[in-house]
Amino acid sequence: MLFSSRAAGALLAGSALIAIASPLHAQDQVEDSAQSGQAEANAEEANTIVVTGTRIRGARVIGDVTTLDREEIVEAGLIDLGEAVRVLPQNFSGGQNPGVGSGAGLINQNINSASSANLRGLGPDATLTLLNGHRLPYNAAFQAVDISAIPLAAVDRIEVVPDGASALYGSDAVGGVVNVILRRDFEGVTTSAQIGASTDGGNFRQQFDIVGGTTWDNGGAIIAYDFANNSAIEARQRDYTSSLIDETTLYPEIQRHAVTLSAHHDLAPGIEASVDAVYSNRRSQRVSGSQTLQTRRAPEVEGFAIAPSFRFDVGGGWQARIEGVYGRDRTLLDARFIPAEGSATDSDGRFLNELTSIEAGIDGPLFALPGGDARLAVGGGIRNNRLDYALDDGFFDAAFDVEREVRFGYAELFLPFVSSANEIAGISQLTLSAAVRYEDYSDLDELATPRIALIYAPVDGFTLRGSWSRSFKAPTLFQQFTFYEAILLPAAPFGAGGGDDTILFTAGGNPEVGPERAQSWTAGFEIQPDAIPGLTVSATWFDIDYTDRVVSPVSGGLASAIGNPGFASLIDFSPEADTLDALIAGAQFGLENFTASPYDPANVAVLIDNRNRNVAAWQVEGIDARIAWSGDVGADSSMGFDLSASWLDSQQRVTTDLPDVQLAGTLFNPPEFRMRGTARFAAGPFTANAAVNYIGELTDRRFGAEQRLSPTATVDLGIRYDIFPGEGREPGLEISLTVQNVFNDEPDPIGQRGPTDTPYDSTNYSPIGRFVAIGLRRHW
């Protein structure tokens, strides 16, 4: 089973990990811990367990936590965290991910072959990605984090909280949080290798990793290295892309090196120092273009981050911590434009993201309640993000180097009114949690985001939960400070005037954009009956009201926008001369005059300021559901299944006078329904697994007649054999065979708006096709 979604108490996790539970039995362990009442509070001084989705040791998160275990990821034949996250039903593969082609919109541009989480399809910038609870530097332009830069060999599991969590973590957590948990207290050396290819051609892939670790009386350390290399998939190798030139890259050539280090040491009783560090380097290549002009891009990405921390027991069950992060992520752009006739030209540039932060906090028990100790966490800190951008394409230069500083403080309260220590008829558990976070941005508003959550269990094994929260996302520095253009056009062709009347149209970045805001509700249940050990049935309803989204408001033709009353609030039909002059003065190229007359502000009949603006609203609603079971079926045999699905309704509205536009279930957006079902059987040295990935119907409304893309279901199979057994979760000597997309399902073709557009929905479907791989692992 590739993922195991559990309610708040899933697996012991967080930025300070002391215990690692077996993935098949972790829920039972955590339930016992979370419901042990006063006994748990008394034992808390001896541990530092923090669950993803809370900052309080020993508290239980009220909401879904989806867990992707490393061993289950490996069994599925996946080699990096980007591949693992992309199979989640709650995640959308659009955004910044390898294989996303042209024609899918700006936010889906594949700049450097990074991999980013994109929960609910709200955008990679609206999902917060953490490493052991620490922030990481952004990648490229869109304020996403490259999750593939962390070697899978170093990872214990990934925990996903698909709920607004700005009250705990600040900006970016509108869609939720992805927390990558590293191994701890690992002994020995494990090596693994995989080789595979697509049966239709291309994507010949080699992968190797090694992880080593040791422990000593007062600490431990691990270090992991990962290398992966794959060849490109070209249009000539797929019959459904014959409209493209043969050399067009459908999936990029990628070579990646990644290293991760994690260590901890007790300096004295009650004082622990730890450090997490990552480094990665990735080169990729892709080709696009037409018969008349070909473009070859070869970006290089290099990134690192180091996160030291100190924890101190201060008495009475309270613990203080100080932690910091410094990291940089640099993309060097390298493009060559090759015309059919004439000389080639070169373009280069960079995206350099830098993160510096320091934070301090304290948590511990406040007072006794019937169900255990009330617990409090408070803290604060300073974070600084920097983006250094430059582009020289041979025709013009664009550059800026800007920083944003934020000061923040937070508080979280956990109140266990009823637990196993004092349960009564009709109430087995009753817990309330509340959190609030305040952030003060150097160039934006001051923000306060609250969260309240409640969990109620009428009997053991049946839990009800709900939450309300507010979240926010700061605009990206690229949205604010990238250049904009000011273009003067004659008004008559657009039906906006005659004679000497003109239109001034602006488009690009806007320093005046502010934060995006969201309000989220969730309600759900979980059933784990004692009568059927190992069975979990759960469902969660979610509703996200996402407002002040930053967009370029006019996405269609100017004539249709000018004549549409719904755009009236966004168009100025009597612009002031000072406003026009200021816009022209700030434009990258000054005024670009496409009229036959000199510029005269008195002749400007219409101003369309189409720079980035806080105007759009998204209404996102849906249900996540799961049923899973695992257990022993013999002396040395086990089996299990896991079926998870997500139904999503997502609509966007640019202004209150314009109609809602359906997003979910349409081209280049998440499907309305997505599901993954897995089954696993193990007997002695043999393990077999199978998975079905289902993507619901999509609709293409870009042209006059709607086109419907049929639902698709792909099947993955894997087998593993232990030549000689290992110990615990570590293999002895293991050989594996995996086949992804067994029946070689192909994406439906779609119409192209331009000759270089990818002729299928590359955000939902992959050109990889059937992929066969052989792997070998050994623990030394």
Image (cartoon, grey):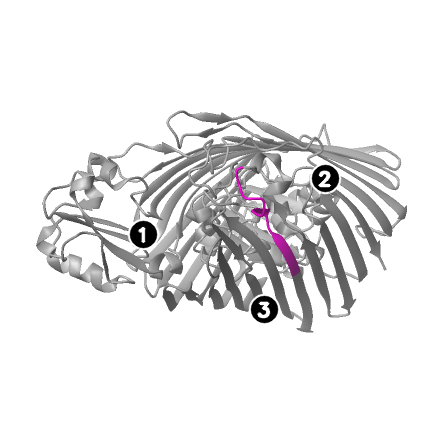
Which numbered disc flags the more N-terminal residue, 2 or 1? 2
Q: Mark 2 — residue?
A: 199
Query: In the drawing, what numbered circle is on residue 306?
Result: 3
Quick check: 618 left or right of 245? left
Residue 50 appearing in the image: no
Q: Which residues are magenta?
A: 243-256
Measured as percent of width and height from the top left, residue 276 is found at: 62, 66
Measured as percent of width and height from the top left, residue 237 is found at: 64, 41
Whole-angstrom CA distance, mark 2 to mark 1, is 44 Å
Quick check: 658 left or right of 66? left
Measured as percent of width and height from the top left, residue 625 is found at: 57, 32
Which numbered disc flags the more N-terminal residue, 3 or 1? 3
Q: Which residue shows up at 42% across the image and 38% down it?
A: 753
Residue 246 located within the stretch drawn in magenta: yes
Q: Secondary structure at mark 2?
A: loop
Q: Which residue shows up at 48% across the image and 25% down it?
A: 708
Q: Residue most toward the bottom?
A: 267
Quadrant placement of the C terminus: bottom right
Mark 3 touches mark 1? (CB < 8 Å) = no
Measured as percent of width and height from the top left, residue 244 is found at: 53, 41
Q: Amino acid at mark 3?
A: Ile
Residue 142 appearing in the image: yes
Q: Residue most toward the front?
A: 341
Q: Nearer the viewer, mark 3 or mark 1?
A: 1
Q: Mark 1 — residue?
A: 612
Q: Nearer the viewer, residue 170 or 234?
A: 234
